Amino acid sequence: MDNSLLDLPTLKDLDITRRRVFMRVDINSPIDPETGKILDDRRIRVHAKYIKEIVDKYEPALVIGSHQGRPGERDFTTLEEHAELLSKYSGVQVKFVDDVMGPAARSAISELRPGEVLLLDNLRLVSEEVLEGAPEAQSMTVFVRRLSGLFDYYVNDAFATAHRSQPSIVGFPLVLPSAMGPLFEKEVIAAAKIFSSTSGPRIFILGGSKVHDLLRVIENLVRNRLADRILTTGLLAQLFLVAKGVRLGDENVRLLEEKNILTLIPRARLLLMKGAPIETPVDVKTHNEKDDAVENVSITKITGVIKDIGETTLEIYCELIKEASLIVMRGPAGVIEDSKFREGTLKILDAVYNSRAFVVIAGGHLGSMIDETKVNDRIHVSTGGNALLLLLSGEELPAIKALQMSKSIFHGGKR
Ligand SMILES: Nc1ncnc2c1ncn2[C@@H]1O[C@H](COP(=O)(O)OP(=O)(O)O)[C@@H](O)[C@H]1O
Ligand SMILES: O=C(OP(=O)(O)O)[C@H](O)COP(=O)(O)O
């Protein structure tokens, strides 16, 4: 990893005391698909602590923005509950406006006084925020042009979204003096130490549902020879099973098709043919919706919808985990929203806690499954998922590039 990351501008390089600040955070959280309520508020708790510190130290008029889910997905919600939880955990009253850049948001921002905090609604309610583009183009969006004039400074504390080249991440740094926030800084410092702290087998346990990002991570890991073993779980495992010629059954293939994952098969096959150290499950837990039955089946005899990795796979993966000196785990092994399919993730986490390895646990859903009492100096729990993995695997993250551009445009920043 590039050590120049540690030269990114920080809050010490700006003078935000009692000034107007727009801070991008990532309080994107797992959501109960039935009730729309937040299932786990770990990211909110972490950000609340830093928001309190910033308010106490600098008393800015602090406007916070975050996304939640993606349009069209069931976790795409408004941020009202997030504001309540931020207030509860920070002890600072966090106002909420159900608008992003319209008249209601702009007047709430203008009326905000030093020492007060306002949360805007889900930034992805603005269609421009969902599109990726170069920083120069994003700085010209209506979104950035409408809001930037209302602020003196921009702070990016959304490390977990640092891999998205979206306006709230890369647009504002080009038009406002900018810095990374305290959580972003902590994550970058921790990431810089990860590979230097180990020698010996490096095992990546990769799962969850964001398969496009993960395939890019795996390609980088393989190209840069950073992984000795990659244990796949979740929807990622299904991609590699299909790439190996395993028949998953119509229901599972349909889900992969809906998520546009089947288009990735040629790239997955190429990795396998190159001899990439990618392991796939030998059995899975399936759910049969007709009779609500849960079965543990071999991958040669799959019926029903795959919801978790199977028992034999767990035994093998847990055995392999014992060999590791570095473990990077990202994404749950199964559909953890349903308690019947949490076992794979929980048992792997247990093996990881009990290993001798230096451990990195990355991402929102996985973070929600950790047992905080097991976390010690050997275990780094990152708020970032794919952002951290892309950084570790050698990519330049758009958020970091934009902060570097900002530093050269505004010469470090003080206004
Ligand atoms: N076999 C599976 N089928 C469908 N979804 C899965 C499967 N395994 C895991 N998932 C889903 O992956 C999602 C979490 O993935 P992701 O967002 O990539 O993780 P994180 O938030 O930790 O970065 C969860 O909503 C979970 O239901
Ligand atoms: O949860 C996130 O990423 P992650 O699943 O890689 O941890 C971030 O909030 C980014 O969300 P996105 O992948 O919808 O851009």
Image (cartoon, helix red, strand yellow):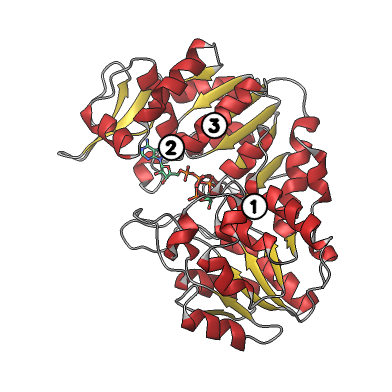
Look at mark 2 in the image and give the residue it sits on. Answer: 343
Disc ID at residue 149: none
- The image shows residue 299 at horizontal and vertical percentages of 33, 19
Look at mark 1 in the image and give the residue it sits on. Answer: 159
Image-based side of 379 in relation to 141, left or right? right
- The image shows residue 347 at horizontal and vertical percentages of 50, 34
- The image shows residue 283 at horizontal and vertical percentages of 37, 22
Which of pointers 3 and 2 indicates the residue nearer the eye? 3
Residue flagged by tag 3: what amino acid is it? Arg
- The image shows residue 167 at horizontal and vertical percentages of 56, 59
Q: CA distance from mark 2 to mark 1?
A: 29 Å
Which quadrant does the N terminus fall into?
top right
Look at mark 3 in the image and give the residue it sits on. Answer: 216
> Element type at marker 3?
helix
> Element type at marker 2?
helix
> Element type at marker 1?
helix
Is ligand 2 closer than 8 angstroms to the Cβ of mark 3?
no
Which of pointers 3 and 1 indicates the residue nearer the eye? 3
